[in-house]
Each structure stands twice: as C-alpha cells, then as structure tokens.
Amino acid sequence: MTSQNEQLAQIGVVGLAVMGSNLARNFASRGHTVAVYNRSPEKTRTLIADHGSEGDFLPSETVEDFVASLERPRKAIIMVQAGKATDAVINQLADAMDDGDIIIDGGNALFTDTIRREKEMRERNRHFVGAGISGGEEGALTGPSIMPGGPKESWETLGPLLESIAAVVDGTPCVTHIGPDGAGHFVKMVHNGIEYADMQVIGEAYQLLRFGAGMEPAEIADVFAEWNKGDLDSYLIEITAEVLRQVDAETGKPLVDVILDAAGQKGTGRWTVKEALDLGVPTTGIGEAVFARALSSSLDQRAAAKGKLPTGALKTFEDLGLSKEEFIEDVRLALYASKLVAYSQGFDEIQAGSDEHDWGVDPRDLATIWRGGCIIRAKFLNRIVEAYDNDSDLPSLLLDPYFNGELKDLIDPWRKVVLYATQLGLPAPVFTSSLAYYDSLRAERLPAAIVQGQRDFFGAHTYKRIDKEGTFHTLWSGDRSEIEV
Ligand code: NBP
C-alpha cells in the first residue's frame, strides 16, 4: 500500500463489494496504482487489510478524497448496485470531478439508463462510459470480458487500462470499444440473454438424459465432460459437469437432486426479450429460456398441476428402440443446433439495436471479445468470428457456409430429439422453439398470409400481393372484390 501523498492513481474503483474489490485487485496486480472508495468505509478497510499487499492501493473515505487521489484525466469505475445507487454515485463523482474526467459504470445498467446518463454527463463536460463486464467475481479478479460504450475519445484513454485487466485469447484482449452511449450495456444485456438460452439448452439436454434415458448425474457429468472436448467446448458445459458430479455432504445424494428446481433471475434476460419485442426481432430461444425460469419458479401452480394434467399416451425410452449411445449423440447434436439458433438470434438483436441507435457495432468484434473471460466463452465463438470475417453483412449466422454445413448434419437428430422429447413427455422448450424458428426461417410460405387475410377481414388492415406492387383490401362485407388503397 502506498501513502496518498506519494503518488496519484491511474484508475479508481467505487463500490467494493465482490465485483469492485476483485476488479481493484485485478488492476493492482497489473501494476496500476488504484484508488478505492466505498460508501461504508468498513469494506475499504477490509480490502486493504486483506489484500493491500497485492499492489498499490490509495484508499479514501470520502468521494472528494477519492477524486483528489486520481491522476488527470481522472478515471473512476463504479461497481455499485444498478439503478438509483449508480445515479447517486455518478452525481457525487461528477460534482467532485473536472471537465474531461471519465466516469465508467461497470454495473449491469439498463442501456436506456446509460444513454440518459451519458447525455447528462456530456452536458456537464464529463465523459461517461457504460461498460458491460462479464465473468462474475472470478472474471473480475483474473480477467473479464469487457464491453465499453461511450465516447470514442474515452476509449483512447481507457483502452490500454482495460486491455491490461481483460482476459486474453490468442494474444487478443477481450475488450474493445463497442460504440457510443448505451452500446456497451446493450450488448452486455444481449450477452446475458444468450447466456440464459445456452444454460437452458444444457438443462434440456440434462433432462432428456436423466429422465428420458434414466442416467445418473455422475454418468451425465462424464458425458458433458466428453462433449466439452468437441464442438460444444465451453465454460458452461464444463461447469455443468462439475455441478452434476457434486455430492451433497448432508444427504449423500447428488447435489442437483437436492437443489430446488426453481431458477432465479436478476433481469438482464427479461430486458433482452422486452427489447427484442420492441425491435421486432424473434429471439425465441432467449424468450423461452426466460419463460422456462419463470415457469420453474411458479411453485404453487406447479404443485397444483403435478399429477393432475393428463399426459396422453407417453412412450418410454425403451419404446423409442434406441441405444443409449445413439440417444446421447442425438441429444448432443440437438443441443448444438439449438445453441446455434440462440446465438444467431442474439446477434440479430444486436444488429437491430445497433441499426436503431446508429451505434455501428461490429459483430465480429463481439464474437472476438466473448471468446474469453465471459460466461458464454466457448470454442464455438471462433467459428462466429470466422463467419463474420468471411461476410460482415451475413443476413443470419445460420447462413454462414460453415454453420450451414454443420446444420446438414444436425437437422435430422434435432428433429428426432424434439420428437422424442414430445413422446417422452419431457419439456424441451428451447430445443423445440428453435426448430420451429429454423423451419419458419427456411419456409417457402408462412401462415402469415392467413393472418394478413384475417386482419384485412376484421379490421381492413390491408395486405400486399406477391404478384404486383401496391396495397390492397378485399371488400369482405360487400361484393368481395379487391380494391387498391
Ligand atoms: P452489489 O450489486 O451487491 O452492490 C453492493 C455495492 O453497492 C456496495 O459497495 C454498496 O455499498 C454499494 N451501494 C449501494 Br447497494 N447503494 C449505494 C449508494 N446509494 N451509494 C453508494 N454505494 C452504494 O455489488 P456486486 O455484486 O459487487 O455488483 C456490482 C455491480 O456489478 C452491479 O451493478 C452488478 O449488477 C454488476 N455485476 C455483478 C456481477 C456478479 O457476478 N456479481 C457480474 C457482472 C456485473 P455499501 O457497502 O456501502 O452498502
């Protein structure tokens, strides 16, 4: 620890709960002098007592002292609870700072709040950077994936600092300037949405192996560990194997069997879906994943329905006439296909958000910085980078020649697994809805023509024709002739 009189800090961290403390330690471990401040001074004192020897920290107990301990232009990262707390801290910092100083919000802010805050700070000559930070507490300490938005000039100053603490894959730091104002928090939001879908498809695969093929958690852990050596190689598959292997010390049962099957959520998945609805982007995989968590948590309704709803004639795994090995491989391929759809939909939402707000987000850059540090890090992201290298205007990831080739091998097992799940009576909402999305996307004709006919019938909403330009209406309650409107 260094005395405040001797030197100024290159970076400051406000908010020293788990994320802020770890981020401050990460900066210090890379040789930066780090100013630290927390509303309740105990957390600052604990950080210094426990980790002060890891590097150069400048602790302060007032915002004014904290700001005074920063090198100019001052750079302070806020890691406090999203919402009102963030607004309060931004204003305290802005009051104590000068023109050109940079305030970075590293929390999980809603991107529209970030747009508002950036504007407010710009009007006060402060730079404001909303930065999505992924990787949880471990990532914050050892190297997260960082998605900073805000003014490009701030990136010039901040970039090297953030690059020094980010995860590194193949020599490339997992951080880049995403785009102006709310772009960073927008892509972090969609990242989390994709994470929801990725977690859910892994859960659905588990469910089929466990309650379809009757496999034990430890055996499924071995399967997942094996999958982690191939196309599905990812952090989430890796940790799922760890969770499945864990035995509860109290009961001796697999831990997964004693964990209440009600999934929590903090809101970023829900935000992703709400925004997708507003943008008109069908992120069905993410939507189903968010709803699956909501349904799992509807405990009273589930208890009331348990054993009461008719199942129809279900098949057993034996009825399917498959070997366990065949089934496992089909489930693996269905998981891969559904995951591909979820990522493709997520990238579509990012493109739509970027177009809507004129952010110029480069999907290739995103795939690059998601390869390490973040929760959805996966080998698969290298393929997404290559897809955008080959065609930066790809209309859908599914149309990239590599993924298109993969889909030729995935489609039959995927259809089979959706069928098996239905016959076994096991819910697989993301596997199923992703296949419906895929079949809709490639369809020659969609039932939307019927919907347009109905809308015109009851509401004179008009329709377009496939054979000529113009907008038309049929006189449904008259002589049923067509008029051009
Ligand atoms: P929390 O989200 O639990 O927030 C606790 C911190 O906020 C404490 O430092 C607390 O100070 C401070 N705070 C609050 Br609450 N109200 C405040 C106020 N009015 N003024 C000043 N400070 C206030 O911390 P976290 O889990 O470390 O997360 C920090 C941010 O990072 C959040 O936005 C979170 O969404 C985001 N994030 C978290 C993760 C994760 O894995 N946990 C991952 C990625 C992003 P006090 O000590 O005085 O109460």
Image (cartoon, grey):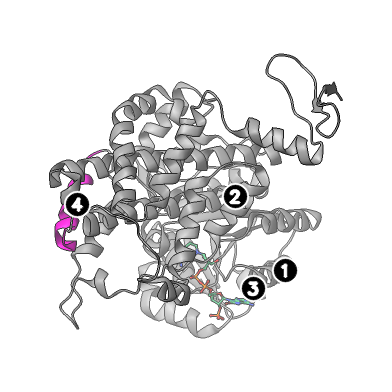
Quadrant where the image shows the N terminus = bottom left
Question: Which mark is drawn over residue 317?
Answer: 4
- Is the CB–ligand 1 distance for label 3 below 8 Å? yes
Q: 221 left or right of 367?
A: left
Identify the residue at image location x=22%, y=45%.
227
Q: Which residues are magenta?
A: 215-230
Which of discs 4 and 3 lies nearer the camera? The answer is: 4
Q: Is residue 161 visible?
A: no
Lower sequence index among marks 4 and 1: 1
Q: Is residue 439 magenta?
A: no
Q: Earlier in the sequence, mark 2 or mark 4?
A: 2
The residue that label 1 is drawn on is: 91
Q: Amino acid at mark 3?
A: Ala
Residue identified by numbered label 3:
85
Q: Residues within 10 Å of mark 4 (few under 14, many from 20)?
A: many
In the picture of the structure, the residue carrying the numbered disc 2 is 186
**Earlier along the polypeptide chain: callout 2 or callout 1?**
1
Looking at the image, tell me whether mark 3 or mark 1 is earlier in sequence order: 3
Q: CA distance from mark 2 to mark 1?
A: 22 Å
Q: Position of residue 150 (x, y in %)?
A: 65, 48
Look at the numbered disc 3 and give the secondary structure of its residue. helix
Task: Tell us which disc is closer to us: 2 or 1.
Answer: 2
Residue 221's x, y, as percent? Answer: 19, 57
